[in-house]
Structure formats: structure tokens, C-alpha cells
Amino acid sequence: MYINGKQLPEKYLPAGVITSAFEARTIPPDHYWVMGDNRVNSKDSRSFGFITKNQIVGRVFFRIWPLTRIKIM
């Protein structure tokens, strides 16, 4: 994954994980690119494209993984 030509460090991905390749895209103003945390099996912007802010529902309120960082947000 590259953002503005710079590779995004994805330290949370296990070594050797294979993710799908996709073409470079420019994200339009007021749109978002979302990617699932299970890259191999996620249905995300790679399959359905950009989303708008009004399509984002909910918020993070509790983190359970990794176990050493459980936290109420």
C-alpha cells in the first residue's frame, strides 16, 4: 500500500502475508478508501470502491486486540 508515493508501513501484517494487488487510485475529495484487517478475505474498497462520509456508520468504542492493549476508547 502506497500513499502519495510512499509505502505505508504495515507492521501489523504477519511476515509473508500475501495481499491482493490493485491499481493506483486517486481518492476524490470527501471520499474514503477502506481496507479490512483480514486482507486476504476482506470485502473492502478493493472490491466496492470509495465510500462517502455518510456511509460510515458506528465508531470504535472498545479495542480487544492485541490483548496487551485492551482499552475502552
Image: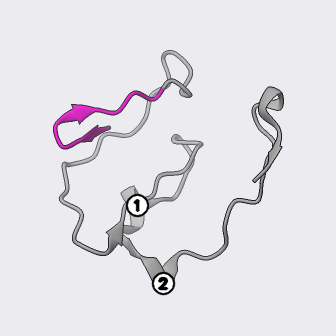
Residue 69, horizontal then vertical, whole percent? 78, 32
Taking the magenta stretch, the answer to whether it contains residue 20 is no
How far apart marks 2 and 1 lie (CA) works out to 15 Å
Q: Nearer the viewer, residue 55 or 16?
A: 55
Q: Give SS at disc 2.
A: helix
Residue 45: give its label. 1
Dot 1 alpha-carbon crowd within 10 angstroms: few under 14, some 14 to 19, many 20 or more: some
The numbered mark, 2 or 1, whose residue comes first in the sequence reads 1
Between circles 2 and 1, the one closer to the viewer is: 2
Tell me if 35 is positioned left or right of 65 in this view: left
Q: In which quadrant of the rendered view does residue 31 lie?
A: bottom left
The amino acid beneath tag 2 is Asn
Residue 54 bears which disc, if any? Answer: 2
Counting from the top left corner in percent of width and height, residue 39 is at: 52, 42
When the figure is inspected, residue 45 is found, relative to residue 63, above or below; the finding is below
Disc 1 marks a residue whose amino acid type is Ser
Residue at point 32%, 37% (across, down): 1
Q: Residue at x 43, y 35 (%)?
A: 19
Classed neighbour count for the residue bearing mark 2: other residues with Cα under 10 Å, few (<14), some (14–19), many (≥20): few
Seen from this angle, which residue lies furthest top? 15
